[in-house]
Image (spheres, rainbow, N blue to C red):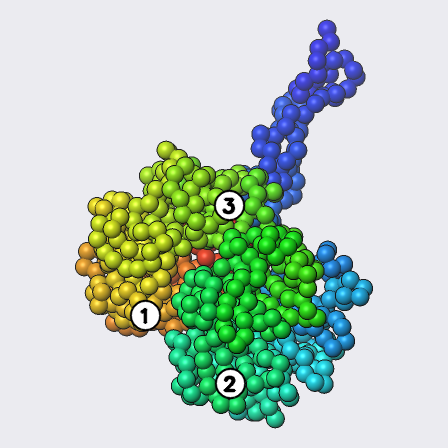
Amino acid sequence: MPSPEVCDGLDNNCSNGIDDMLTAPPCALQQGICTGTVKTCGGTSGWLDCNGANYGPSYQAVETLCDGLDNNCDGYVDNGPGCVSTSAGMGAPGYSNGPLMDARFDTPLRPLFLSGGDVLVPDSQNHVIRRLNLTTGQVTLEAGTLGSCGREDGPPGSGQLCDPFALAEGEDGTIYVADHHNNVVRTLNAGVLGVAIGTFEGGNMDGPALSATMSGPHDVRWLNGTLYFVDGHNCRVRKLVGGMVSTVAGTVCGGAVDGALGTEVFGYIYDIDFDPTGTTMFIADTGNHRIRTFTLATGVTATLAGSEAGFRNGAGAQAQFHEPHGMAWTPNGLVTADLYNHRLRRIELPSGNVSTLLGSGTPGLRDGTVALARVAEPRTVAFHQGEVWFTANAEHRLRKVTATNDVVTVAGGASLQHADGDRQSATVFWPQGITQDPSTGIAYFTERDSGFIRALHPDGSITTVAGGQVLGFLDGPLLSALFNRPNGLHFHQGSLYVADGGNHVLRRVDLGTGLVSTVAGAPGDCDYLDGAAMDSLLCWVQDVAVASDGTVYFTEYGHVVRQLKNGVVTTLAGQADNAGYLDGVGTAAILDFPRGIEVGPDGLVYFVEGSNHTVRTVDPMTLAVTTLIGPGCDDINGTARNGAMPGAARICSPTDLIFSGTDLYITSSGMDRIKRLSGNTVSTAAGIRWADSYADGPVLQARFGDPAAMANAPGGGFYVTDVSNHRIRRLMP
C-alpha cells in the first residue's frame, strides 16, 4: 500500500524512486552561515546531523576564524580566540569618491581653498587628502594611501600620511600638511608627498627644517612668506622661514598666562589664524577654554574671550567656551568651533563680545536656517567668499553657512541619527561607558553627547533605556529623565549607577521600578565637598564602580577618587583641583585626571589616569595609593612596577580597565590599543598603534578609533566602546 515518502531508504510512495519527493526539514540552528540550510537524507540512517558537510566549508563547531562570519552559527561573529569584531553600530565614517553628495569621508577637517578654485580636504582618519572640484561636482583622491597610516613619500597610492590635520598653500603653489601622528609638516606638489619640517620623531627642537622636531602638529598657516604651525603637544606656535624653524609663542604647557614675550603660557593649542593686516595672530587655547591674541610686532599675549569651561555669551572674560577648536577670521568677527557646546560662536573684534552663530547646545545634524540648524561637536572652520565652512567630529561631511544665513551640506557622508533596531539597522552615537548584567547578557552603554542610556542585547539589537532627546537634568521615569554627558556606568543588583558628568552628580537607574534618581551631588554645582550624599558636591564625574557590599567608588575630573558608602561621600585619594603625580596615603597622594575605575579581585580599587598615563590602585582600607604602570605617555611593553622598583612598561591616555580572572585589560585611547597586564608583564592585547581608524580581524591587525570603555560580553571576551567609529566592538583575547 503506497504511503507518504519518508527518509528511510525505501520507496514508500511506489514512485520507483527511493527517498524522493521529500521536503528536507531545516537544521536546528538558523544563524550565521547556517541560515537557510536543511538536513540531508541518509537513507536507512535517517536524516543526517547538521554538520560541516551540510553547512559548507566555512562551518566550524568551535569558531577559530577571524573572517567576519558566524562560523559556528551561535549568533556571534568572530567570537573565537584572537578576533575583534563589530557587535553594534553602523557608523557614518567611510570612503568613496564620486559626486559630492555620494562621496564619503572619515573625520574630514578644515578645507583649503586653492588659488585655482578647487578645494583640498584632509580626510584625517582615512589618512588621505581629497580634492573637491566644485565645477564638476566630483571628489577624488589627491594624496596618501587609503587606510594606511605611514610616513612614505610619493604619489597617491604609495605616499603615506598619518592623521593629516590641516593644510596651507604657499606662494609657489606648494601645499603644506600638518601630519599629526607623524610629528612632521609635509609638502605636497602635484600629488607627491615630501617632508618640509621634522624628523618623524617627537620633540621640541628649533633649528634647520629637517633636523627640527615637533610633537603632534595641529595647524599650518602661510603668511607673507612664512609658514606658521601649531606644535600641539608642546603648546607652542612655531614658524619656518629661510629654512630655519624657531618658536613664535609659548613656553611650557599649563595654565593661561598672558604677558610679554617669554612669559606667556598656553594650554592645548588647536588652531591659529591672522587678521587681514597680518599683525595679530588669534590662538585657540583649547586646553584653557579661551581665544587669545598674539601681537607679532611686540610679542604680547592677551586673552580676547573666554574663562573657565562652560557656555555663556558676553564680552571678554564673561564669555565661556568648552574646548574651542578651529577658528576663521571673517569681516563680521572671528568664528570659532565650540566643540562640546555644539555651537559655532562669533567673537566681535576688537571688543571680544561673544554670541552664537549656529547651534543650540544639543548635538544634531540638521540643515536649514541658522536658527533651526544643528551641529554635533564642530571642530574646524574656514571662511571663503562670504561663507563659513565647517566640519564636525560626528558628521563626516562638509557643511557651510551661506551669506544668507542658511546651513547647507556641500559634500560627505550619511548623518548619524538615533535609531533603535536589530544589528543591521540600529545606530550608535559616540558610545562612552559600558557595563553588563551578567544574568541576562544585556550590556548597557552611555552615549555621551546625546544623553541616552541604551541596551545592547545578546542578539545584537539595541533599545533605548533612559534619557531624552536633549541634554539636561531631570529625575523620574526612564524615558522622561534627562542626562548631561553621561560617562561611565556600572550594573549592580538590578540598577545602573551612572556618572552624569555634565550634571556633576551620581544617578541611579532602577531597571525594576523604571525610575531615575540622584544619589549624590547637587545638579549643576561643580565643586568638591564630602559629607552626606545629598549635601556633597561633585565635579565632572568620570566613571563609577560598585563593590559587592554596595560601596560606590567614582573618579572625578578634579583629580580625586571618592566613595559613597552608607549614604556618605568621602575622598579616598587625591587633592581636589591639585593636579600632579605622587604616590602616598589618601589625600597625600596627588592625581591627574583619573578616569576608569574597577574593583579588583583582590579588593583593591584600580583606576587609570588620562594625564599621568598611569594605572594605579588605592586600598580602601589603608588608603595607600600605588602605581602599577607609568607615569609617562608611551607605548612600551615590558615589566610593570614591582614595589619600589620602577617598571619599563608605559601606556598613553588610558581610559578604562577590566579584569578577566587575574589579568587586567586597559584601553589606551592615545594609542588606539587594548593593553594587557598579566602577572607583572604588560603586552598588547589588540589594535594597531595610532590606527585611529576601523577594521575587524585578528587582534593585532584590528583598528580602533579612541577605544573608551570595556565590559564583559555574552559568549566570552569583552565589549569595547569604539568612540570615533560609533560602534560597539567585541574583543576575544
Q: Quadrant of the N terminus?
A: top right
Q: Amino acid at mark 2?
A: Thr
Residue to which mark 3 is pinned:
469
On screen, residue 545 above or below 313: above
Relative horizontal placement of residue 7, taking residue 545 as reference (left or right): right
Q: Amino acid at mark 1?
A: Ala
Residue to which mark 2 is pinned:
295
Q: Quadrant of residue 101?
A: bottom right
Relative horizontal placement of residue 194, taking residue 216 as reference (left or right): right
Q: Position of residue 108 (x, y in %)?
A: 62, 64
Relative horizontal placement of residue 30, taking residue 263 as reference (left or right): right
- Alpha carbon distance from label 3 to label 2: 44 Å
Q: Position of residue 252 (x, y in %)?
A: 41, 81
Q: Residue at x 50, y 67 (%)?
A: 354
On screen, residue 329 above or below 688: below
Q: Position of residue 624 (x, y in %)?
A: 22, 63
Q: Amino acid at mark 3?
A: Gln
- Mark 3 or 2 closer to N-term? 2
Mark 3: few/some/many CA within 10 Å (<14, 14-19, 20+): some
Which residue extends farthest top? 1
- Mark 3 or 1 closer to N-term? 3
- Mark 1 or 2 closer to N-term? 2
Relative horizontal placement of residue 509, taking residue 571 as reference (left or right): right
Mark 2: few/some/many CA within 10 Å (<14, 14-19, 20+): some
Pick whichever, 269 or 18, lies toward us: 269
Q: Residue at x 39, y 79 (%)?
A: 257
Secondary structure state at the residue bearing disc 1: loop
- Alpha carbon distance from label 3 to label 1: 35 Å
Residue 579: image tag: 1
